[in-house]
Image: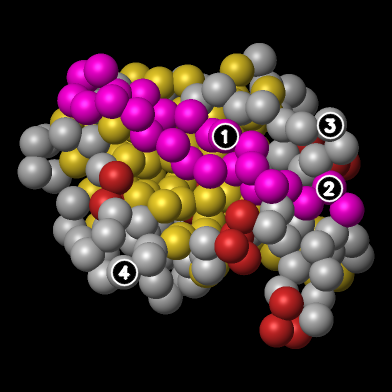
Amino acid sequence: MGKLRHFVPLVLAMLAGKAYSEGFGPPSGSLPAQLLPLEVPAGSQSPLLSATLFRSQPHEHAVPTYYLGTGIGIARLQIPNAPGAAVWQVVKEGQGAQAHVKLVPVALDVLQATDAQPVTVQASALPMECAAAFEGSCNSRDGTLRITTAFEGKRRQSKVPGGFFGTEAPINATFYTGVRTLSIEHLPSGRVLKLEEQLRNTRAYEAPQSAIRYLPELKLMLLLGVAKVNRVPVAHSVLLP
């Protein structure tokens, strides 16, 4: 599943005047992130919009291979691949400070050939609540990472029309002006990566839990469009100590 985002109805944003939420900016901090080059084959769906993580492990003690897939069907339910379906292999090369990560496009049938299985919510290294709420904190299942969202600024209460189309009874809503911070801490080392989201008189905010992928066996995190540069989603890799 791709990134989720909470939206303010357009008319409310217009009435509020210069309301905005442009998403998280580039990462910074003592836990370094690298831009992750991404080649999207012509006609293919981008993994920054919606991607499924697949895992292939030939035997129990082998280091697994990870893939990102977009538009991949479910064979056992006879659901075919969607138009533009594509697969990338997550490749980590080198060791230590010299290591780097890339996403390599591969053929669709690689998933079947390697018996790669989708990583379910229950099997994910990060619980789904990580980075989902406006404010909150959670740990990875192995206790290595802590992911926190926190807000510093002003909160304004107001009544807004209820319902999806704004045609129901008014409800209470909170509008935010300030800075919301997404922090990812590597607990064994104390190193932290931070991304900041500027909010101005808005209810809209990023909830990028499904765009943060933690691959513990590779000591690697992928941020698949969590950050934006000039409002364009970009990918980063984070090599953990």
- Residue at 36% from the left image edge and 24% from the top image edge: 100
Residue 56, how many percent across, how many down? 44, 61
Residue at the (84%, 31%) spot, across then down? 42
Q: Earlier in the sequence, mark 2 or mark 4?
A: 4
Choose between 178 and 119: the one closer to the eye: 119
What residue is pinned by disc 4? 59
**Distance (Cα) linking label 4 and label 1:** 23 Å
Q: Which region is colored magenta?
A: 83-107
Residues at discs 3 and 2 in contact (Cβ within 8 Å):
no
Residue 87 is one of the magenta-drawn residues: yes
| Residue for badge 3 | 42
Q: Nearer the viewer, mark 4 or mark 1?
A: 4
> For the residue carrying disc 2, how many other residues have a C-alpha within 10 Å: few (<14), some (14-19), or many (20+)?
some
Where is mark 1, residue-wise?
104
Residues at circles 2 and 1 in contact by the CB criterion of under 8 Å: no
**Majority secondary structure of magenta residues:** strand
